[in-house]
Image: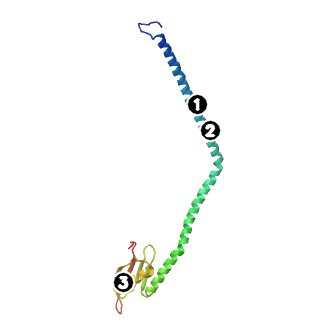
Amino acid sequence: MNDINFINTATPEQQSALKQWYRITLTFGILFLTVCGGITGWQLYRYSLAYSDSLTQKQKAMPFKKLLDQKAQLQTTIDEQTKTVEKFKELPRKTTLIHSFLQSISKIINPQELRSVRLGTETELNFLAKDYKSAQSICENLKKETGRHNLHIVSLESIQSSENKILLVQLKESKKQT
């Protein structure tokens, strides 16, 4: 190479080393890009196959979508009916418990003295008693007989009768476990 504008050029050995470096770099660069392109092309090919297979499967499954919707609807209906059936299965046990509770009450409290019984979320019982001690003993006997240990006297109301003083006793079952 000739000196141009007083610039020193590379020696012939340096020039040949630069040419070799350029050719090797170019070769490896093209090889790298070819490998990356090949891998990316293979991935795109696999993706397009999977996508077309997915579309094919969706088209094949289209008639079954209606069946699947019907199945889901039937399953919700079955679940609702199962809940209803469970309520009815539970009913005899609840009825038996209520019946045994009412029998226990009729054993302990004279039916003429019993004024009202309310069962449900809160058990409430109103009856007549001679005095506080008899009301307390009836309450204790009910606790033992029925197994409901949360029954408590809530109020006592004095009622004047023709013969003597009578108490109207109100029992309630508290929800707190004691």
User: Which residue lies at the image location 57% right of the left edge and 32% below the top edge?
Assistant: 39
| Label 2: element kind | helix
Q: Earlier in the sequence, mark 1 or mark 3?
A: 1
- Name the residue tied to disc 2: 49
Identify the amino acid type marked 3: Gln
x, y percent for residue 91: 53, 73
User: Which residue lies at the image location 57% right of the left edge and 27% below the top edge?
Assistant: 34
Return the residue nearer the eye: 126 or 50.
Answer: 50
Return the residue nearer the eye: 15 or 114.
Answer: 15
- Name the residue tied to disc 1: 38
Q: Quadrant of residue 92?
A: bottom right
x, y percent for residue 72: 59, 56
**Label 3: few (<14), some (14–19) or many (≥20) C-alpha neighbours in 10 Å:** some
Work out how far the residue at label 1 is from the one at label 2, CA to CA, in angstroms.
Answer: 16 Å
Work out how far the residue at label 3 is from the one at label 2, CA to CA, in angstroms.
Answer: 85 Å
Return the residue nearer the eye: 69 or 31.
Answer: 31
Q: Quadrant of residue 7?
A: top left
Identify the amino acid type marked 1: Gly
Q: Earlier in the sequence, mark 3 or mark 2?
A: 2
x, y percent for residue 79: 56, 62
Which quarter of the rendering shows the C terminus?
bottom left
Of the numbered discs in the image, which one, if any, rests on residue 136?
Answer: 3
Q: Earlier in the sequence, mark 1 or mark 2?
A: 1
x, y percent for residue 78: 58, 62
